[in-house]
Amino acid sequence: MNKSKILLALIILTAAAYFFTRGVVGMNEQDLILRTAAEKARYVEEETVALAMVALPEDEDMVLSFRTSQRFDFVVLDEDEEEVWRWSKDKAFMQVIGEETFSKEDPSIFVITWDQKDNEGNNVSPGLYQVRGEISSDPSVYSSPIEIEIQ
């Protein structure tokens, strides 16, 4: 897939996640609403999976504390709910305390792609997977998982 197609897919995915129009969306039940979405529900093996998460407070602006510079994460779980892949696994973050304000008027949007490889770099097997978005605050805030299928 070329870069322009990936960019277009991410723009469409971000809009879908924000407006909560896709069937493949998860959200939590806390004051900070997290909407996690996948570009589609089914993927062929080795196809890039585009994921997005939108974070916005339910009522008024919300300030969350963080122990590192990491602000979000995505986790993929297999059918046994075992972690298969974590976006942050191979990343380094500054060990710095900080705060982030989440605003309903200016939602925070996080978009990433997953290459269908596990945490060890191996291709994952066909099957059903759950994807969960996370705000890496202290304490963390999680979206409800969404389900995708790799065929």
Image (cartoon, rainbow, N blue to C red):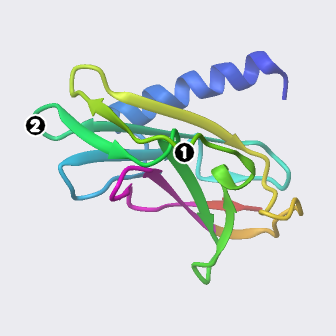
Asked whether residue 18 is drawn in magenta, I would say no
What label sits on residue 95 in the rendered view? 1
Instruction: For marks 1 and 2, give the one nearer the viewer.
Output: 1
Q: Which residues are magenta?
A: 129-147
Q: 90 or 18, which is in the foreground?
A: 90
**83 up-or-down from 123: above or below:** below
Q: Residue furthest left?
A: 59
Amino acid type shown at disc 1: Gln
Quarter of the image where one finds residue 122: bottom right
Residue lying farthest to the bottom in this orientation: 80
46 relative to 69 in the view: left or right: right
Residue 136 covered by magenta stretch? yes
Which quarter of the rendered picture does the C terminus lie within?
bottom right
Taking depth in this image into account, of 139 and 110 the one nearest to the observer is 139
Which residue is most to the top? Answer: 4
Q: Residue at x 11, y 33 (%)?
A: 60
Residue 71 horizontal/vertical position (percent)? 47, 41
- The residue positioned 29% from the left and 20% from the top of the image is 106
Residue carrying label 2: 59
Q: Residue furthest right?
A: 122
Q: Is residue 105 above or below residue 140?
A: above
List x then y, in percent, for residue 43: 72, 51
Judged from the image, the secondary structure of the residue bearing numbered disc 2 is loop
